[in-house]
Amino acid sequence: MRIEVNDKSFEIIKLLGKGKGGYSYLVTDGDKEYIVKKIHHEPCSYYQFGNKLQCEIEAYKRLKSIGISLPEMYDVDVERELILKEYIDGNTIFDMEKDTVDVTEYIIQVNEMCKKLYEANTNIDYFPTNFIPQKGQLYYIDYECNDYMEEWNFENWGIKYWQQTKELIGYINKEIVRKFFIEGYVNHDYDKVMSIVADNYIDHSPAGAKSNKDAIGILKIVENMFKDLKVEIMDIFEEGNMVASRIKYSGIHSGECMGIAATGKPITFEALENFKIKEGKIIESWGYWPDAEIKKILESK
């Protein structure tokens, strides 16, 4: 799959993630790798935008003038709402924290950034997914910035996610669950699923998996039932080592389901899934799929 930014064409390597303002893709022109950010217009309950593309451009100029280390903005396709950015390779601070790597030296660099930012009446998004160290230099890889508010500065908000706090651990647990849904149901990358599901995993739903291998078997059955399956995480909450979620599934009925042969019908339904996490792995789950609703949809004319 390819994507065009003005008159330049790039091959999409993979989707890196979705933020408040857009989707970020790793791309290549055959010689070098870049980031292309595609602006989206999905609502965000806790953040308000004006013109998202223009906000990105102005934020980039503002941060460059302040002297913050960040990826270069190479090109902007206004019509397609695309931004071509420099690719800063490496693990994010969040990735490092998941592996319990000490990030103290980079906290020092963030504090140095803060001196410049506060003097310029500016805050950035201090969440650790937005920072990548490369050759000892810490880069802020987002362009988001706002006028300074003490409540959202690094000392009062950001630092909570740069240490092994309950806030960080809770976020990591939610990310493990998100990874399970995306890799298991959408990407079908079962090796990645195996890496986050414990060997002695127990599923308390009717499916009744008793190991991570059983879990993979169930995922493969679902893959056969529904092609082009899409997963949307509608709600996700965490408390302690528990994560609760409400998930919307949509796809095409392509294989036997509840004794009903493939119909080719599109189907959408919601399910509730709860997970228990221990030491970075899913050890138990409680799931509810609306079997009666699914059967009714598949049997309808």
Image (spheres, rainbow, N blue to C red):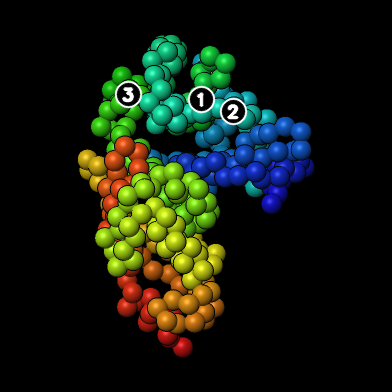
Res. 73 visible in picture: no
Q: Dot 3 corresponds to which residue?
A: 163
Name above or below for residue 237 compared with residue 248.
above
Residue extending farthest bottom: 301
Q: Mark 3 or mark 1: which comes first in sequence?
A: 1
| Residue 237 percent coordinates (x, y) | 28, 47
Q: Secondary structure at mark 2?
A: loop
Residue under the image location 64 percent in, 29 percent down: 86
Q: Position of residue 206 (x, y in %)?
A: 29, 68
First of labels 3, 2 by sequence position: 2
Estimate the x, y position of residue 261 in percent, counting from the top left.
49, 82
**Type of residue at label 1?**
Ile
For marks 3 and 1, give the CA distance: 16 Å
Q: Are marks 1 and 2 in contact (CB under 8 Å)?
A: yes
User: In this picture, is 109 found above or below 251?
Assistant: above
Expressed as whole percent of the image width and height from the top left, the position of residue 277 reads 29, 44
Residues packed near mark 2 inside 10 Å, few (<14), some (14 to 19) or many (20 plus)? few
Local SS, label 1: strand
Badge 3 marks a residue whose secondary structure is loop
Please state which of residues 75 and 169 is positioned toward the viewer in this rendering: 169
Residue displayed at 51% across by 28% down: 91
Residue that badge 2 annotates: 89
The earlier-in-sequence mark between 1 and 2 is 2
* Distance of label 1 from label 2 (alpha carbons): 8 Å
- Marks 3/2: CA–CA distance: 23 Å
Identify the residue at image location x=25%, y=32%: 166
* Residue 219 vs residue 49, the one in the foreground: 219
